[in-house]
Image (cartoon, rainbow, N blue to C red):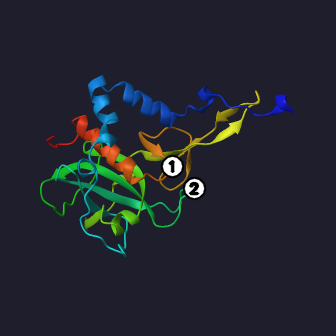
């Protein structure tokens, strides 16, 4: 029986998402990588997104523009593309969002679309709990045109191969949950992103100089 057991090898787990992340990390200068690695050792007031206003029933919908108040005391804006109801293993009250590189000193109601020129992060899958605890705050709404961008998700999955080992057998999908036979231009894992992940990714973009925030 021992020889029939499926074995796991580290190299069998590489997938397009981890390859993308590794390539991005390898392109970052060592000093910048150290700053990113040290992020979670900072005092919490330097890394926690500040609540703006809590709303127990946020009533979210596609096209909503929302703000996040960063520790640098500026506001960063994102947009809800659609509810994540058609994605596998995603619960109710989760939404697909994109984050643009628009940053303001005062809270505003910007009417803007995210395209390849002002895209910063995402697509993320986030919960309406971020509105209920005030980390995200809706400031306006404008029609969704961002679904014209080539964005999607990668669903990681392991399956046994003929060699008796587990291999990566995941697949890409679009924002509607339809399976794709190609890699989208912009994609993330088909999984919720936590507030720690959100703060880490935003800080990484600040350290890399991709967001107009003064250190």
Outermost residue toward the right in this view: 1
Q: Residue at x 26, y 62 (%)?
A: 51
Cα distance, mark 2 to mark 1?
8 Å
Q: Which mark is residue 190?
A: 1
Dot 1: element: loop
> Quick check: can you spot residue 80?
yes
How crowded is the residue under tag 2: few (<14 C-alpha within 10 Å), some, or many (20+)? few
Dot 2: element: loop
How crowded is the residue under tag 1: few (<14 C-alpha within 10 Å), some, or many (20+)? many
**How many labels, in total?**
2
Relative height, residue 88 to residue 189 (above, below): below
Q: Position of residue 212 (x, y in %)?
A: 17, 43
Q: Residue at x 38, y 29 (%)?
A: 25
Q: Which mark is residue 88?
A: 2
Q: Residue at x 28, y 50 (%)?
A: 44
Q: Quadrant of residue 105?
A: bottom left
Specify whether 104 is left or right of 206. Answer: left
User: Which sits in the foreground, 60 or 174?
Assistant: 60
Relative height, residue 47 to residue 131 (above, below): above
């Amino acid at each position: 029986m021992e020889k029939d057991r499926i074995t796991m090898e580290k190299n069998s787990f590489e997938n397009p998402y981890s390859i993308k992340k590794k390539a991005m990390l390898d392109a970052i200068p060592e000093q910048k990588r150290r700053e990113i690695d040290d992020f979670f050792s900072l005092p919490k007031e330097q890394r926690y997104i500040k609540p703006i206003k809590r709303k127990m029933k946020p009533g979210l919908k596609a096209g909503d523009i929302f703000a996040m108040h960063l520790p640098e005391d500026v506001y960063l804006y994102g947009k809800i593309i659609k509810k994540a109801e058609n994605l596998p293993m995603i619960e109710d009250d989760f939404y697909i969002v994109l984050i643009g590189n628009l940053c303001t000193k005062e809270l505003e109601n910007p009417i803007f679309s995210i395209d390849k020129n002002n895209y910063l992060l995402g697509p993320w899958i986030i919960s309406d709990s971020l509105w209920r605890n005030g980390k995200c705050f809706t400031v306006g709404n404008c029609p969704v045109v961002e679904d014209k961008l080539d964005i999607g998700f990668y669903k990681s999955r392991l399956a046994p191969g003929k060699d008796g080992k587990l291999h990566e057998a995941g697949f890409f999908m679009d924002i509607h949950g339809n399976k794709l036979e190609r890699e989208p231009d912009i994609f993330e894992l088909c999984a919720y992103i936590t507030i720690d992940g959100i703060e880490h990714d935003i800080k990484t973009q600040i350290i890399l100089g991709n967001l107009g925030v003064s250190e």
